[in-house]
Amino acid sequence: MMVRSILEPAQANYWLMQGQTLFLILHILGVACFSYIVAKRMTPLLRGQTDARWDRPWTRLGMVGKFWLGQWKQPRYRGAGTLHLLIFAGFLLLATRAFTVLIQGVSVNFVMPGLSGEAGHVYGIITDYAATAVFLCMVIAMIRRLVFRPARYEVPPQYGQARTADAIFLLALIAVLMAADGLLEASKAAFQTQQGQPAEFLAVLSLAWMLKGALLSTSLPLLQNLHLGSYVLHEVTFFFLLCYRPFGIQFHVETSLFSVYFAKLDRGTLKPVRWGVSEEHLDEVKSFGVKKFEDFTWKHMLDFYSCADCGRCSDNCPANAVGRPLSPRFLTRKAREYSFQHYPVLGRADQGPNLIGSIYSEDEIWSCTTCGACEEECPLLIEYIDKIVDLRRGMIDDGNVPQSLQKPLKALESRGNAYGKMEKKRADWVKPKEFQLACNVPVLEGEQRADTLYFVDSITSYDDRMQAIGRATAKILDHIGENFGILGAAEKDSGHEVRRFGEETLFQSLRDHNVEAIQATGVKRIVTSDPHAYNALKHDYKNMPQVEHISQVIAREVKSGKIQFRPVEDKNNVYTYHDPCYLGRHNQIYDDPRDVLDAIPGLKRVEMDRSRDRSFCCGGGGLMLFYEPKEDQRMGVKRVQMAAEAGANVLVTACPFCMVNMEDAIKVAGLEGKMTAIDLAELAEQQLVRKAPAAVEAAEVAGMQPEFAAGR
Amino acid sequence: MTVEMLVCVRRVPDTSENEIALNREGNDIERDDLVYSINEWDNYAVEEALQMVAKAGGNVTVVTVGGDDDEEILRREMAMGANHGVLLCDEAFDGSDGKGIATILKAFVQKGHYDLILTGVQAEDGGAQVGGMLAAMLDYPFASLVNSIEVRDGKTLKIGREIEGGNKEMNEIDLPCVLSIQTGINEPRYVGMRGIRQVASLPVPTYGAAELGVEAGAVGASGAKVKRVDYFAPALGKGARMLEGSQEEIIDELLELVKAKGGLK
């Protein structure tokens, strides 16, 4: 028998055409087709609004290293995350191999520079295993989708059809690609082995290795045909996948790198009404916010393409959990479908209808508490809050505001607080006699000066129950010897929720008023007990002195020794700490409040399943207290039930809005008498070891009790 | 068809944002620290006019009798979408009673041409007088407590009226006419500072008694036949009881009382 070499695809004749020519044509066709589709997909981005994403390249490269290359968020879902890590690593490793195979279709002896000789063999072994891993992952992923069906992939009827078939099809295509590559190698190796020629070493137990084993007794002509056929299969599958991906969720393979590079870098901030338009020129902007699709920025449009439909956002969204008509996953998916429909690959782009009323409902957009759980979870760092706020700005601009929100907004405009209370009563919370005896809180007006400003904000100033948080905060500041005061009637609402509800003009007026009032006091520091005010002062206001939340102050003074705590009275109480969204997720203050609790002797603390960056929103603050959502259940009720499940009977939080929602929820959930809610500042103040004589202390403590016992 | 509409509006102390207290003389409320807004019923009337114009075409003019401070609410309604705002302002108008206001408005109506005139059912600090009087003075048909309007043709409207007890009656009414609008007829749109700023430079013409041809003696304090002689918060009568204590205690006591009177079984 004459020994002959296997014919490579480039050398072989496919029907009437030489392989080399055929594959050159197919390559060019495939690349051209892909380029055309991508160019079409970029059209809306070019018509979108500008976005400031070209700054801080090194930080952005760092983000790419961590979140794209490092897949940082993936392990938050153990199973799916591990699968994705393997597939992603496999794709990265196989990229070079894929290009080599493609080029070899045109040029037989092509070797990727640096991968000749030893390195090539090592790389070959790596890719054998990588392809095998990817293949197996595809099989597992298909089984997950078909058999185990994780709940977060389900599509509720109001959001359209499930895409299981599409998902399976794409997974299968990748599996076919891996198999074709394995067969290409295996058929050649089996051929060469049968001929007694040196064959490329195939990694033991890899897909190619197993296929080779199966093919060792196959006839040479069949092996030759398998070799040539598997190349065609590889070619066709590769380019089909490439061109099919931009039509669905797998487009993230191409776009995720850019989405992550251009991701939002500053937590807690909001995008301006229009990038590149200063506030002085805002009056010249004809329309505020997002009304039509092209009002989104190009980055936000890119987000729509990048979403992999993994469902993690909605799995963590409290609005979705309580049956509000909002699911971040579908917020994105509906926008993607809208863009595909109105910017088709074939045919001309047309002007679609306004988003509200076509793909989004008003209630959907008002349902968001801006808690940030979705953004925290998204592996691709897709933004939601800025989009929601932009859509709200659009509705506000059109006068499209629920009646329940119009009164508080009007009151904020005329009185500086959502409750319509008189400005002159803003400092009334300091007036109770027993408090005035214990603590002096000067209003910083006229010649009255202080180092530190306690920014109280509206709810703590006016709400009977929350005033206790204000007094506890003031007593703590007084205890540590802080030279502080308040703005009193000169303070207006921080406007944090006003801004997040899309009323930018009103927010700016509140902010300008407060900035002027704060600057007039000449304070060096600001302390607040309200995380929403904290976030506003820190991120929405400019040129503010240093801002601290009271939990940070307490934690620091516990370390310094200025604050010492008495042991808890009731050793049977089990405490749990609820992270307020604007302290935790938006400002990363997780440890200070916990350190304070752990510094109280004898305090037994447990963590809820959802804690720290997975904390579950209480129901939202500020204007959200006025909004009447469509929901099956209150978020707060779910949250207090989580606390009960964790075995806690005292729920500690550090936000007056959380307190409103938690105390209401305790009643609604029927946990009254079984669970209490207390603010961190209240608890800390209650447990303070005072420098005052014991008798006075006892009297004060006794005096304090009714304040905490009184419900709302 | 297009409809030329006039909505008569009024600026009132906002009851939800003020703590209303009597002044020392006891003849009025303390007005130092008040914030004002448009009378709620009037706001619904303007929204209804805007929605009708959006469907049928035409113009909406808002008019108020008052001083310079009242221009604020005209601007607010213009920001909502009203095409014109007119201020009827004259020292001679001060102290007008309901009939005086209606007289001034009548004079303004007769200067122009309006198919439909809307007022609120009542003002938060008023007596639901002006709409009916204005209609009578103009010899126009009038319907009060209107909670739905449908434009039939150029000559008639089909309107719904709220009847005590929750019933509704439907009427046909000939144009031109005067309707007093009940709250809840629509959902008024929101107007923020930005909207008001955008109409800040639009002119708001002011007309005085001379321009309107109103005889000074027929309006204002001198022409008023109804005069306020006293203003007070009524003393608690017998049978009224204030429950005291914490919220829980109040609720418990209330439940007991309702049960005792047979309200709960």
Image: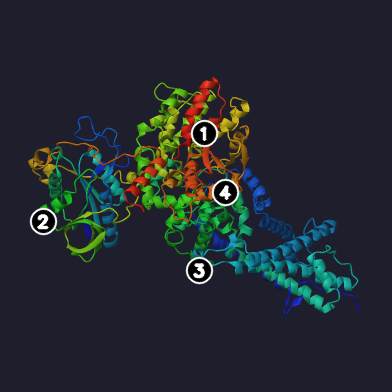
Label 1 SS: helix
Instruction: Say if mark 2 contacts mark 4, CB within 8 Å.
Output: no
Q: Which chain is home to disc 2?
A: B
User: Mark 3: which amino acid?
Assistant: Gly
Residue A693 sits above or below residue A108 on the image: above
Q: Label 1: which residue?
A: A682
Badge 1 and badge 3 both on one subunit: yes
Q: Is residue A526 left or right of residue B205?
A: right
Observer able to see residue A27:
no
Q: Label 2: which residue?
A: B139
Q: Nearer the viewer, mark 2 or mark 4?
A: 4
Q: Position of residue A422 (x, y in %)?
A: 34, 35
Observer able to see residue A608:
yes
Name the residue at 54% across, 57% down: A329
Q: Which chain is home to disc 3?
A: A
* Mark 4, other Cα within 10 Å: few <14 / some 14–19 / many ≥20: some
Q: Label 4: which residue?
A: A642
User: Mark 2: which amino acid?
Assistant: Asp
Q: Nearer the viewer, mark 3 or mark 2?
A: 2
Q: Alpha-carbon distance for marks 2 and 1?
A: 67 Å
Q: Nearer the viewer, mark 1 or mark 3?
A: 1
Q: Label 3: which residue?
A: A347
Q: Alpha-carbon distance for marks 1 and 3?
A: 64 Å
Label 3 SS: loop
* Mark 2, other Cα within 10 Å: few <14 / some 14–19 / many ≥20: few
Q: Nearer the viewer, mark 3 or mark 4?
A: 4
User: Mark 4: which amino acid?
Assistant: Met
